[in-house]
Amino acid sequence: MCGICGYYSFYKEISTKNILEMNKAIQHRGPDDEGYWVVNQNKGKSFSGIHSTEKIQENFPLLKDEKSHLALGFRRLSIVDLTEKGHQPMSSEDEKITITFNGEIYNFKKLREELSAFNFKFKSDSDTEVILKAYQHWGKSMFEKLDGMFAICIVDLNKKNIIFGRDRMGLKPLFYIKNKDGLFWASEIKSILKNEFVKPEINWNGVYTNFLFQTTLAPETCFKDILSLEPGGLMVLNIENNSFEKEKYWILNSKIDTEISEDFAAKKIDELLSKSVKEQLYADVPVTSMMSGGIDSTLITSKAKPFKSDVNAFTIQYKFSEDEVKNASLVASKLKIKHHIKTVSDDEVLADLKENIQHFEEPYSSLEVLMNAAEYAKSLGFKVVLSGNGADELFAGYSHTLKLKKWLLWKNFNFIKNLIFTKDPFSERVKNYFSQDSMFDFFRQSQVGMKPSEAANVFKYDIFKTVNTDFTKFQLSETKNYSAYFEYDMKYSLSSHHVFRDDLSAMKYGVEFRYPYLSNELIDFVSTLPEKFRFNGIQNKPLLRKVAENYLPNEVLKMPKRGFSFPLHHFIKNEEKVQNFIIGNLESLKKRNFFKSEIIDAWWKNQNNPYDCVKIWQLVTFELWYQKYFENL
C-alpha cells in the first residue's frame, strides 16, 4: 500500500523538483520509504529521497535538481516483504521496464508459481515483482489476472509506452490530467496540483453531480480536466507520438445463471468469503478487523478467527451508536477475541474538522468516522484493517433499495408532475418523486444529496448555464429490475464514493483497508445470481443473512440497518461550535458570487427535517474545498 505519482512532459525537459513536490504531497500514504526513477536520453536512473531508508540511500543517489521528460515518484507503506527488496520504483533486469504500484495483489503467490514454471526468477517476496514479471510475460493481458486492489503505472522503454491500470472496483485511486504540456498522474489530486504545468480550475459539471450524488461521478472530478482512471480500465500513452488510448479489461457480468438453487448460492458465497478473508489476512505486519456491530463487519471478523486465532477487532463508538457497540462486543465475546473500543467525543470530532474535510479533495455531505477509525487502528499498532465495505452494494443492503419495487409501479404515474403548479415544500417533494423517469434517477434520489431543482436554484445563473445537466453519458444498462440498480450501486455508490473516501481516510494515517467482500470470484459469482435470491423488496441483504445465520447471534441479525457515520444533523442542531463554523464558512462562500446568497440564507434558516442539513453541509464543504485548493496552494 503506497502512493504513486509521475509526469511525462511532451515537449521539453522539466525540473525534477516537480516530482519531489508531487511526492511530498502524498507522503502520508507511505511513511516507510520513498523512491524516484528518472529518464534521460531513453535511459532510466533510480534515485533516493530524504525519507528513503538507509540502505536505499546507500544504493541510490539523492534526487536533487535533474532535468527530465519522464519521472516516477513513490511513497511506501510496507505491508508485504518489509525489506528493501520491495522498494519502488522497481525495474526489470535490463532496466527497460519500470513499475510503480499502489495496492495489494492477493493471488500473487499463485501467479508467482505460474511464472516460475516459465523460468522467471524472483529476488524478493513482494507482489510488486510478480506484477512486473507478469507484465513481461503476458503484457497488458496480465491485468485481468490480478485479484486485489491496485493502481499501477508501468513504463516500457522498449515499446515506448506508459501503461496505467486500475483494479476492477476502483479500490485504489488513480487521477490524471493530459493537457498541452504533458501527462501528469498521482494517487491523490493534491499531488498532481504540485506540478508546475497544472493549475487548478473548477469543473462545475463535477460540482453539480457532487451535489446531487454526494460524490462526483467518475471519471470526472471537481477539478477541470483532472479525471480518474475508471475501475477495470487501462490507459496507454505512447511516448514516441504522444498518442493516447483507453480500454476496459473487465466489465461487470450481467449473464444470470437460472439453474442455480438458493441453498447452493448461499453455500458457495460462504466458501468464497472464507477464501477471500483467508487471502486478505496475509501480511507481514499486524492485521485487525473493524467491527461496526452490523452483519457485514461482524461476519468478516467471525470468518477471520479460524484462520488467525489471535485476530483482534476494534469498534468506534460515537453518539447514538450504543446498540452497534453492544452487538460488536457480543460477537467479540462469542469469538473470544480481544476487542478494542474507542469512544470518539464531540470535541474530537470538531478538533480537526476543517483539516479532515479539506483532505477529501471535493465537497462532502457528512462527517467521516473512518478517519477516526484509521487513526485509532494506527495508535494500536495496526497497519492493515479488514473492512465490511462493499457488502451493501453486493447484496442489496441499503434501506432505499427496498423502495425499488414501489417506484417501478409508481413511475407509471409520472405524468402527475405536470399537474403540480404549487411551490410549497411538500409539492416540490412530490414533483421530485414523480420526476424519476429512469433507474439512474431512482439511484440519484436514493443518495440524499440536493435535488436537481435545489441545485439549479442555488447556483448563480451565469455559472449554472455552463453546467451540462444531461446525464446520458453516466447511464448504464437501464433494465427494469434490480440488476440495473445493482450496476449503479457498484459503479457509483461503491467505486466513485465509498472506497474513494475509505482510501483517503485510511491513507491519511498510513493504514490499509482491505475488503473481503470485493474479491474477483465473489463479485463474479454474486452478479450471476437470480434477482429473487439477492433482492426481495422486503428485507435487506436476504442472501448474506442466510450465510450469516451460521455465524452470528440473533441480536446482530435483527439490528436495523444504520450508516457508519457521525450524526451530522445532531451536531448542527445542538453544537454551537458547529453552528458558528457553518455560519462563518457560509458567509465566506456568499462573497465568492458562485451561489445565490438568499437561497443559502433560506436553507440555513429552514431546516425542517434531518436531510435538510445535508445541502447546507455540501455548501460548507465546497467552501473549505475552495479555500484549500484554490487559495492556499
Image (cartoon, rainbow, N blue to C red):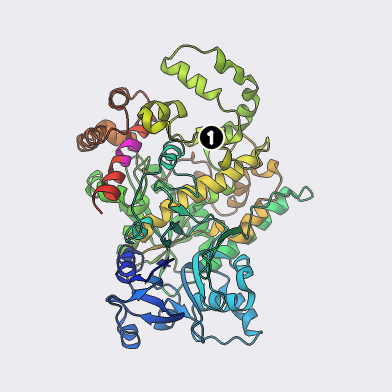
Residue 272 in view in this figure = yes
Residue 344 in view in this figure = no
Q: How would you classify the magenta stretch by its main secondary structure?
A: helix
Q: Which of the image's four quarters has the N terminus?
A: bottom left
**Residue closest to the eye, 333 or 258:** 258
**Residue closest to the eye, 320 or 169:** 169
- Seen in the image, is 80 located left or right of residue 552? left
Q: Position of residue 64 (x, y in %)?
A: 28, 77
Q: Position of residue 601 (x, y in %)?
A: 27, 25
| Residue at the image position 55 percent from the left and 12 percent from the top | 419
The residue carrying mark 1 is 470
The image shows residue 185, relative to residue 482, as above or below, that is below
The question of residue 621 being in magenta is answered with yes
Which residues fall within the magenta stretch? Answer: 617-622
The image shows residue 46, relative to residue 401, as above or below, that is below
Q: Which amino acid does label 1 sit on?
A: Asp
The question of residue 584 being in magenta is answered with no
Q: Which of the image's four quarters has the C terminus?
A: bottom left
The image shows residue 318, relative to residue 503, as above or below, that is above
Q: Position of residue 68 (x, y in %)?
A: 37, 74
**Residue closest to the eye, 535 or 580:** 580
| Residue at the image position 61 percent from the left and 69 percent from the top | 140
- Seen in the image, is 570 located left or right of residue 484? left
Dividing the picture into quarters, in which one does residue 588 lie?
top left
Q: Position of residue 383 (x, y in %)?
A: 38, 67
Q: Element type at marker 1? A: loop
- Seen in the image, is 543 located left or right of residue 291? right
